[in-house]
């Protein structure tokens, strides 16, 4: 149980285009979903926290107009990288949190590797 | 926020025990976690410990928590080549997680 999927797993796009990444909790309802960014050989950097039906809370330094987050349901959150540029190339990981699972933990998706040419 | 620190690299021989250490600054974390990340993959929850526990054992994994020193460790017994990965410790206050820098474990056959 507690499986989180991401789609796509790898995407290559041209500079200036927008890319949407989906995060789904497959067998539980997530009250909160998180989006992280990870650079090579570095730890995870929290980008934003989203609760279903409300606006996402962005961490300092993260452009909310560039990284659009929609948390449409208790099982789906999307991250759209708008007008992507090469410096947006990174590994994006989502996680889903449910306090009802007993461990108060976050369950992570497998990640999406974005390469912007 | 919380600062969570780990040593960056660890190499062990196959069959030996590995000990990965983590120190943190905020003692209000309810749970402390260990995650494993293999190359190009997301984070896999390995184990966790409730903050009022000193030790938790789960098969080859042993977690030790020293709240006084704010020190958390993960011991992997009989380390195998498949254990080679990056290991992250994390503290949690509510639903906010604070991750360590990650320790890259290399297992030498």
Image (tube, rainbow, N blue to C red):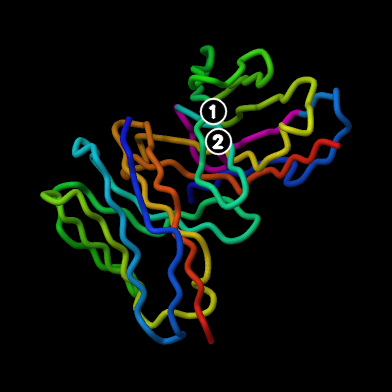
Q: Which quadrant holds residue B2? A: top left
In the rendered image, which residue does mark 2 sit on?
Answer: A36
**Mark 1 neighbour class, 10 Å CA radius: few under 14, some 14 to 19, many 20 or more:** many
Given the image, what chain letter belongs to the residue carrying mark 1?
A: A
Outermost residue to the right: A14
User: What's drawn in magenta, residue-wise?
Assistant: A20-31
Residue drawn at point x = 52 percent, y = 25 percent: A48
Residue B99 drawn above or below residue A87: below
Check if mark 1's residue and mark 2's residue have beta carbons within 8 Å: yes
Quadrant containing the N terminus of chain B is: top left
Q: Is residue B103 left or right of residue A15?
A: left
Residue drawn at point x = 53 percent, y = 79 percent: B81
Q: Is residue B50 magenta?
A: no
Q: Is residue A78 left or right of residue A97?
A: right
**Mark 2 neighbour class, 10 Å CA radius: few under 14, some 14 to 19, many 20 or more:** some
Q: Is residue A27 magenta?
A: yes
Q: Which quadrant holds residue B63? A: bottom left
The picture places residue A57, in percent across and down from the top left corner, at 49, 17
The picture places residue A60, in percent across and down from the top left corner, at 49, 19
- Secondary structure at badge 1 equals strand
The picture places residue B13, in percent across and down from the top left corner, at 45, 84
Outermost residue to the left: B68
In this view, the residue in front, A84 or B95, is A84
Residue drawn at point x = 61 percent, y = 17 percent: A63
Point out the tag, 1 or 2, that comes first from the N-terminus.
2
Residue A59 drawn above or below residue A92: above
In the rendered image, which residue does mark 1 sit on?
Answer: A47
Residue drawn at point x = 22 percent, y = 54 percent: B71
Task: Tell if the residue under mark 1 belongs to the same chain as the one under mark 2.
Answer: yes
Residue A30 drawn above or below residue A83: below
In this view, the residue in front, B37 or A116, is A116
- Secondary structure at badge 2 equals strand
């Amino acid at each position: 149980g507690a499986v989180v999927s991401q789609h796509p797993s790898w995407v290559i796009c041209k500079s200036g285009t927008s890319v949407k990444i989906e995060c789904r909790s497959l067998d539980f309802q997530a009250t909160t979903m998180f989006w992280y960014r990870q650079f090579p050989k570095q730890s995870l950097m929290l980008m934003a926290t989203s609760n279903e039906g409300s606006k996402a809370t962005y961490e300092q330094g993260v452009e909310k107009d560039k990284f659009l987050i929609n948390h449409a349901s208790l099982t789906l959150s999307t991250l759209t990288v708008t007008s992507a540029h090469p410096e947006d190339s990174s590994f994006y990981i989502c996680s889903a949190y449910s306090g009802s699972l007993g461990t108060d933990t976050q369950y992570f998706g497998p990640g999406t590797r974005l390469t912007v040419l | 926020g919380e600062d969570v620190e780990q040593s960056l690299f660890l190499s062990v021989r196959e069959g030996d025990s590995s000990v990965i250490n983590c120190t943190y600054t905020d003692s209000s974390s309810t749970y402390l976690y260990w995650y494993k990340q293999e190359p190009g993959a997301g984070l896999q929850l390995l184990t966790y410990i409730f903050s009022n526990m000193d030790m938790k054992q789960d098969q080859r994994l042993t977690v030790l928590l020293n709240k006084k020193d704010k020190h958390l460790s993960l011991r992997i017994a009989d380390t195998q080549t498949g254990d080679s990965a990056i290991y992250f410790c994390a503290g949690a206050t509510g639903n906010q997680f604070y991750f360590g820098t990650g320790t890259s474990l290399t297992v030498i056959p």
